[in-house]
Every structure is written in structure tokens, then in C-alpha cells.
Image (cartoon, rainbow, N blue to C red):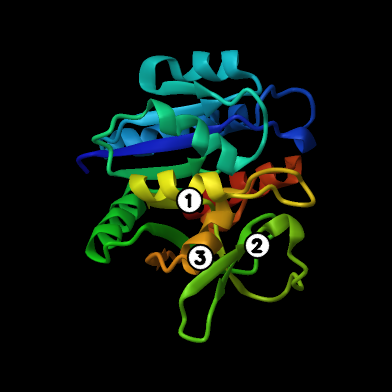
Amino acid sequence: MQNTIAVILAAGKGKRLGSFYDNKVLILLRNKPLIKYAVEIFEKIAVPIFMVVGYGKTKVKKVINDRAFFVEQKEQMGTGHAVSCVMPVINKKVLDIFVVMGDHAFAIKSGYLIKLHKLHKQTDAEVTLLTINTRRFKGYGRILRDKRGKIYEIVDGKHSMFASETEAEITPGIYLFKTEFLQQLLPKLEKDNISQEYYLSDIINLAYKNHKKISAINIDDQKLAIGINTADDLKTMEVLWRNTK
């Protein structure tokens, strides 16, 4: 994967997990911090890592050491803003950029990223994302498609009003972008009216409106649909991991 880098977003704070953790990515799953899973999958495919840090940055850096290049997000203004913090420091030779959430990479397999990259290149897409069909969509962005089956928007999970028993296509926040595409459209993101943050997921609708190519690969892996936001979520993932590994 020449001229490709990974951006791991690790600046947020897991407020619902109590004050024990300075940063959600430091939560232990199978005795390993979540952020290490994110780093390891990109090390397996030899992709250089840029990590966006903020809350608890000192501890996060200590856990990762020199395995990533760190970029600080000084103000917590959302995932779109986090990615924009990286853009000024990357090499001009970088053509494609993976983006993953540091607290949700524990279920990703390197093979998924290889498939994502292959489709991205084959379709010459501006952005390619991983999706999954599931009923476990709480907190995740839901994929919306037009009559032709093309993705045109991601509805952020915080604002989704769909019934919980309805199966939906969601994204666990795993993207691959052309660098040039991000340079063009990141500055056009607007703050969400409710959270006052810049959501990276909003760039999908911008891509659609600007007639940019959007590709997606759907993975049948239900572990990807479970986020760790509460102590109960952590227990659920521990059990599921034991039963499926």
C-alpha cells in the first residue's frame, strides 16, 4: 500500500465509563488497551500511522511510544476537525488516507483493510467505507442510499430515531479517502447544530452532492457493530470475543 497512511482518532473522552480512564482508548479489552488494537492492524499491513490525541494525551503517547506520529487536537471539535489537524503535516506524496476510530478498532481485521484498499483502487473512488448490516446500531452512523443504491448520506447515531429492532446498514467509522478529496472537502464541513462539532461522516453527503465516487464494502462481522460506551458494553464484548475467537 504505497503512498498510503492511517489516521487513528484518539482524542476523545469516554465520559460514560467513569473517571478511571483519562481517555476511552485506554480501556482494557482482554488486558490490552483499545488503542493498541488499532495500531497493530496497521502495523500488520505496513501502513504508517498518524494518531490524533487530546484528552489524556500523555498516557496515550506512553502506551504507543514511537509506533505512531502524534498530532494534537487542542480543541475537541469533532471527528472532522480531528482529521483536518493531520492534513498540514502529511507528506505531499500521500495519495490515500485510512481513518479509523481509536476506540473501535479492536474488531477490525487486517484483511478487511486490504479488501477496502483493493476496492478503493479498483473503483477509483474518492472515498470508500466499510459497512455492516445489523440490529446493533446504537451510537453508529446509519447508511442512507438513493433509489439507485448509491450511498448519499450517513445519519449520525446520536440523532437516529429508527426503532431498535430494525436491521440497518451502518458504518463503524472505517474509511479510506483520497488525500486530494479530503483537502477539497474538509474545509466545507459545517458544525452540527446539536453538538456544535464537525462530523467526518457529513463528508459523505458533501461527496454525493459534488458527484464524487463513493464505494463501500459490506462485512458480515457483528463484532464490528458493538461499541464500548458503557461498562455493560465492555462485558458484552468480552463475552462475544470469548465465544467467537
* Residue 242 against residue 202 in the figure, above or below: above
Label 3 packing within 10 angstroms: few (<14), some (14-19), many (20+)? many
Asked if the residues shown at circle 3 and circle 1 are in contact, with their CB atoms under 8 angstroms apart, the answer is: no
Total numbered labels: 3
Q: Which residue is identified by label 3?
A: 132
* Residue 89 against residue 29 in the figure, above or below: above
Q: Earlier in the sequence, mark 2 or mark 1?
A: 2
Q: Earlier in the sequence, mark 3 or mark 2?
A: 3
Q: Tell me, yes or no, if residue 30 can be seen here.
A: no
Image spot of residue 103 (x, y percent): 57, 38
- The amino acid pointed to by label 3 is Ile
Q: Is 163 in front, or is 85?
A: 85
- The amino acid pointed to by label 2 is Phe
- The amino acid pointed to by label 1 is Leu
Q: CA distance from mark 3 to mark 2?
A: 9 Å
Image spot of residue 93 (x, y percent): 23, 35
Q: Which mark is residue 137?
A: 2
Give the position of the N terminus as an image quadrant: top left
Q: Quadrant of residue 216?
A: bottom left
Asked if the residues shown at circle 2 and circle 1 are in contact, with their CB atoms under 8 angstroms apart, the answer is: no
Say which residue appears at 59% left-offset and 41% top-offset.
79
Q: CA distance from mark 2 to mark 1?
A: 27 Å
Image spot of residue 86 (x, y percent): 45, 31
Q: Which mark is residue 185?
A: 1
